[in-house]
Amino acid sequence: MTWNANNRSKPGEDGLHPTYCRLCEAQCGLLANVEKGKITKILPDRDHPASQGHLCIKGPGMVDVMYDQDRVTNPLKRNRVTGEFEPVDWDTALRDIAARLIQIIQANGADAIATYLGNPAAFSTLHIMYARMFLAKLGADKIFSPLHADTGAQFLAEELVYGSPAHHTFADLESCDFLIMIGANPMVSHFSMVTEPLALHKLNEIHARGGVVVIDPRRTETAKRFEHIAIRPDSDAWLLCAILNHIFAGGLANTEILRQRTDDWEQLRDALQPFSPEIASLRCGIDAASIRQLAERFAKARTSACYGRLGTCRGRFSTLTNLLIEYLNIACGRFGVPGGWVIGDVPFSALATKTPAHDEAQSRVSGLPSLMGFMPSGSIAAEIATPGKGQVRALFVDSGNPLHSYPDPEAAEAAFAKLDLLVSIDFYVNETGKLADYILPAPTFYERADLTLAFMANAPRPWVQFTPEVIPPLGEARLEADIYNEILGRMGLPRLFSAFATTDRPQPELMDIADQMLRRGPYGDQMGKNPDGLSIAKLRDWFPHGIRLAPGVNAQESWNRIQNERKRPQLWPDLLPKELARLLSDPKNDDETLLLFGRRSLGSLNTWMHNVERLVRGDRPTLLMHPDDAAPRNIADGDMVRVSSKTGSVLIEAEMSYEVVRGSACYPHGWGHDGGWRHANSLPGANFNVLASSDPRDWEQVSAVVHLDGIKITVSRAEGSAAMP
Ligand SMILES: Nc1nc2c(c(=O)[nH]1)N[C@H]1C(S)=C(S)[C@@H](COP(=O)(O)OP(=O)(O)OC[C@H]3O[C@@H](n4cnc5c(=O)[nH]c(N)nc54)[C@H](O)[C@@H]3O)O[C@H]1N2
Ligand SMILES: Nc1nc2c(c(=O)[nH]1)N[C@H]1C(S)=C(S)[C@@H](COP(=O)(O)OP(=O)(O)OC[C@H]3O[C@@H](n4cnc5c(=O)[nH]c(N)nc54)[C@H](O)[C@@H]3O)O[C@H]1N2
Ligand code: SF4
Ligand SMILES: [Mo]
């Protein structure tokens, strides 16, 4: 499918094409130079209204992915006997897939079909919506995603406090004077759940106005630039309880706001009494005086916000931690004020149905609740391996690599091999794809039109941009929506978006739907009734670099964006007393075990950018250990070490570092490759998730997020280990 009416520069034409990067939430503006149908260079777009010339190495590096010799641009079929992939034509592949789906539905029912929708889909227009639609058309609804290794706990906390997991709170960086960042490393990640490409610039401004405090078990790239408070992994709930305890005990709370605009704050205040800074200090490793000082700086700053990201989302108390972040902002009167903690404006009209509520469905294998309509994704292998009604027999893996991204890859490998049908929609044969019956090649984002529908509600400086494809899809690559439509067609089922058909649009296409959402939304042209409003055609022709939608977020409006019935933040959900009691009775960690947590690097993105030599040249996956933890174990820099958890064990290289807090160890995620990529497979390193548990009892039970940060490990010097050169 192409969006081809009157493009300024047509896909593939020579010259500079304004476009934007769809790798991380910053969505930086880019200029792609095309010569003879090929992208030759990616330049920063200084005319972009938000990124203003910022970009990182991955945006240009994506061109190397595009032209990678290991990239898949034609459909492949795996011979189950030899294990080898062979080229196959689209029609044969799609017909076979359609026939097998019909067979599976007849024999096992539609609930034997499931989809795993990976991270890149979040950046591709309406992808999450239409992947769900595809399943719905088949009569199925079991969908898995990275949610349970990522944002799940934050979204659940938002649902519990404000009534919706799809309306997010974030820091209004523009006029914030004091920012606490817990478990986030925007100097590398470029922020998550705050859409702001100029991360460094914005943090520098806040630092100059008041302060940026980074709470992290590692002295990260971000922590080094600002103030760092080192914390033990998986102990943030203690710290936050103690900060709130001091806020209430020290008369620092904004009781007027609490009384007038929230519900149940007194229960929260009373329940936090046992969590004195002294008691919390024993658990989180931050001294009581520093906890009190942090609380006071936060409460007394002219404006302030407390923001948490991935480091708060994969521990054993993730939902609690994320609730406490909301409560801290609310209790200090920071919610819904400029420079504070806000809910942004969704700049599009929602055509989709309401996001399903937490616990609307339960996993048949663990009993754990669904979140936003996604099934507990750590159970994907068990959903395939466990017999009974609803056993998954056919799996679509679209833009994902669950075998590498979730705990216990060995169990996943065994389970995936037993499927009747595994289809990977991807441009690489990744570790999951290696087991697939079919690889159906998708275009990269440079070969695809998109509208910045996603993440704009989280932008302190909201904008919108449309990009046509810079060049047409390489080889036979096909957009995911088209692939789904072709399968549905061969099954005799209606196309995606058929529910939106009208007499003048009998077969609406993806971009027609996106256009409708923009045009009917608050900034839209109201289908022609408001000539000053926006449409995709206008963005394409008049604003190819994108356009700022508003000078900033309307912070006060955050109150009107609360989605629960009472339209007030709820400070005492049913699960809270239980979670607080669980925290209080949590046994203290002994000194023998270390707590393992992860890190990312600037040149790689999760599991799939390691095949590009220039992106990984400077990376070396090592286990960072504090010298005080290494010495008693007789471990030195460069030694190979055996790292074991109750789930698995890996042999990796150790690196001495004062960056990590004592009692912890840090290893990057996404390494240890064994997919269809030559360079990545040749690199050292192991898959972190071998050490993470796939036993649902080890996960946080309310959100079903898996436990990836703070995994208990033992580390010993490997026999015969010599220091690496
Ligand atoms: N131990 C540990 N585990 C983690 C994490 C961690 O920090 N530590 N992080 C977690 C997080 S935050 C996330 S988001 C997940 C990610 O988990 P996943 O989404 O399962 O995995 P990715 O590594 O993002 O793999 C994405 C795949 O999509 C392909 N792809 C890229 N763009 C496109 C596209 O446009 N279309 C299609 N069809 N395919 C595309 C890539 O080639 C790649 O194979 O991993 C989680 N797992
Ligand atoms: N270069 C690059 N950028 C990326 C990605 C990438 O892979 N590479 N991935 C993208 C994706 S999918 C996501 S979800 C975002 C994530 O964006 P961020 O959350 O900003 O990035 P992370 O590097 O995961 O940062 C998590 C931080 O939490 C810390 N941490 C770990 N455990 C704990 C803990 O128990 N307590 C506290 N307080 N901190 C802890 C880690 O040391 C780390 O610094 O990044 C996105 N951007
Ligand atoms: S920061 Fe890098 S990866 Fe993220 S959008 Fe910008 S160029 Fe792309
Ligand atoms: Mo993520």
Image: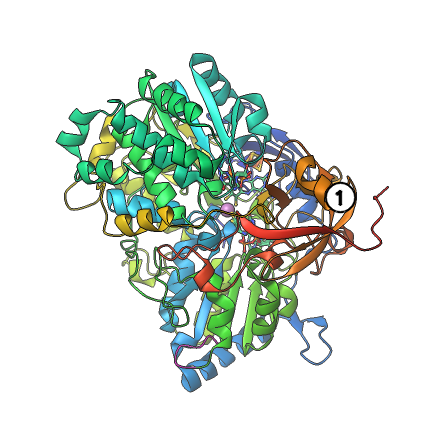
The chosen color scheme is: rainbow
Amino acid type of the residue that numbered disc 1 sits on in the rendered structure: Ile
Q: Residue at x 66, y 73 (%)?
A: 78
Asked if residue 193 shows in the view, the reply is yes
In the image, residue 391 lies in the stretch drawn in magenta? yes
371 in relation to 273, above or below: below
Q: Which residues are magenta?
A: 388-392
Residue found at the very far top of the displayed protein: 208
Question: For mark 1, does the 10 Å Cα neighbourhood hold few (<14), some (14 to 19), or many (20 or more) residues?
Answer: many
304 in relation to 665, above or below: above
326 in relation to 389, above or below: above
Residue that numbered label 1 is attached to: 635
Q: Residue at x 42, y 23 (%)?
A: 289
Between 549 and 374, the one lying in front of the other is 374
Across and down, in percent, residue 124 comes to: 48, 48
In the image, residue 553 lies in the stretch drawn in magenta? no
Quadrant location, the C terminus: top right
Across and down, in percent, residue 530 comes to: 25, 33
How many marks overall?
1
Between 484 and 379, the one lying in front of the other is 379
Q: Answer yes or no: disc 1 within 8 Å of ligand 2.
A: no
- Magenta stretch, overall SS: loop
Q: Is residue 367 left or right of residue 471?
A: left
The answer to which quarter of the image holds residue 637 is top right
Q: Is residue 676 left or right of residue 172?
A: right
Across and down, in percent, residue 117 comes to: 48, 58
Between 125 and 603, the one lying in front of the other is 603
The answer to which quarter of the image holds residue 167 is top left
